[in-house]
Amino acid sequence: MRKFLIVLGLTISGQIAFSQNLTLNDAIGIALKNNLDIEVLKNNVQVAHINNDKSIAGALPTVTATINDNEQYTNVNQKLNTGVEIKRNGAAANQLNSNVTGSILLYNGNRVKSTKKRLEQLELQSKQLLNAQVQNTIAGVMAGYYDVIRQQAYIRTIDQSIDVAERRLELVKVQQNVGLANNADLFQSQLDLNALLQTKQSQQLIVTQAKTDLLLLLNLRPDTLIAIQDTIMVDKSLQMDDILRNANRNADVMAADNQIKIAEWAAKEVQAQRYPSLRANMGFTYNRNQQTAGQLLLNQSSGPFLGVGLSIPIYNGGIFKRQEQIAAINTKNAGLRKEILQRTLSNNVVKAYQTYTMNLQQLEEQKKNVELSKKLLDLTLQRYQLRQATIVEVRQAQQSFENIGYAFVNYSFAAKAAEIELLRLANNLK
């Protein structure tokens, strides 16, 4: 199988046309690069990674600067105990208040730690969901790729049958020339050949449509030219015990396990709300008050400050209690969903493996049938040439050859599809 592609750059569309073989590895690589669902999940991983930070959890200090500058005009009317009277309209006054404050959390019942652990699990879960999409994408591409091969294999069977029909038509013409065949045999042979040629045309359309479906999976233009020259090779070494054991590494199961841990840490965050919160505050203030009239014309102060703040929850109408109950239920549901997923996964593994083994058995038997049908067809043609068999017997042998050829291809594809599904369930597609 050739390992390269001749790539033609389409300057207008920016798409890719393959004038040589498209291999399975090529198809998988293109799909993983172009799949939009994977791009969305990659973005989700990036978002989760950004969120997984101590600052989001509240562990880092915060620094805030504020400035307020107010200019006002007032009417002043003051009488002092010294007997002095101050009366002035439209006196200007300016108030400037500014401060820089730093605050750091010292204790809040380990809520920061619980939040950070929950964010870590969210990031791990986003990676598992991405992994699951990658496995699903690979499985879909492989199924589409081998479906094209299956449809092309049907054409090869039809071509072999066309060769037989042409040989039969030639034999009828030869026999008719010597008076050993009639027009009925000639017409029937020609009709059978025409029907096979029409069947081939219809099958070629099916192949084209199968390639179009594959191009959709690759996120390429539907009119992109691709050629696939490959065969269906089934791995016969898969064992159900190995698949079941590896199914615990299935990305969906691991994501469900992450969800349990997320719910557990969320519950601890809720529980931490019952504990006091202690914060340390420090900073620097500057205040200035200036007036053009009145007893106090200038008042200015500045300096650092340091203090602690303690917040103790006493009563909030039972909200914390209800939040804890809800968090406990969410944790329980996460565990139940994982158990349901594991049971479904095990069931799917068993069914896929049953399909896999049955098709492998049928495939071995069908190989023998293909050889026998080919021998029968050749023998029947020889007997027909010697006038020891009728044209009906030739048609029956030919039809048997076609049906067995189709069945052999179908069993090969079914076994391969079951193999792909087993590897997907075991999170082992590459």
Image (tube, rainbow, N blue to C red):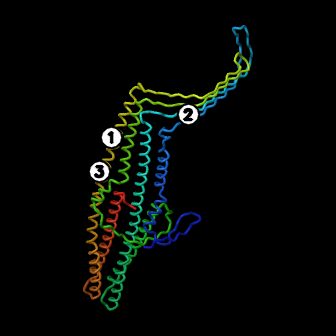
Residue at image point 28% right, 74% down? 367
Reply above or below: 312 against 369.
Answer: above
Relative depth, front residue between 120 and 374: 120
Task: Check if mark 2's residue and mark 3's residue have beta carbons within 8 Å.
Answer: no
Left or right: 399 in relation to 143: left
**Which mark, by number, is residue 343?**
3
Task: Check if mark 3's residue and mark 1's residue have beta carbons within 8 Å.
Answer: no
Residue under label 2: 102
Q: Nearer the viewer, mark 2 or mark 1?
A: 2
Upstream in sequence: badge 2 or badge 3: 2
Left or right: 266 in relation to 347: right
Reply above or below: 186 against 57.
Answer: below
Where is residue 81? Give x, y as percent: 69, 8
How far is mark 2 from mark 1, CA to CA? 40 Å
Relative depth, front residue between 216 and 276: 276
Q: Quadrant of residue 139?
A: bottom left
Residue at image point 57% right, 28% down? 305
**Which mark, by number, is residue 211?**
none
Residue under label 1: 332
Reply above or below: 167 against 24.
Answer: below
Residue at image point 40% right, 39% down? 266
Task: Check if mark 2's residue and mark 1's residue have beta carbons within 8 Å.
Answer: no
Q: Amino acid at mark 2?
A: Gly
Q: Amino acid at mark 1?
A: Lys
Q: Please, what secondary structure does the residue beneath circle 1 have?
A: helix
**Badge 1 local density, few (<14 within 10 Å), some, or many (20+)?**
some
Where is residue 66? Give x, y as percent: 61, 32
Name the residue at the bottom extreme. Answer: 178
Upstream in sequence: badge 2 or badge 1: 2
Q: Amino acid at mark 3?
A: Arg
Q: Please, what secondary structure does the residue beneath circle 3 have?
A: helix
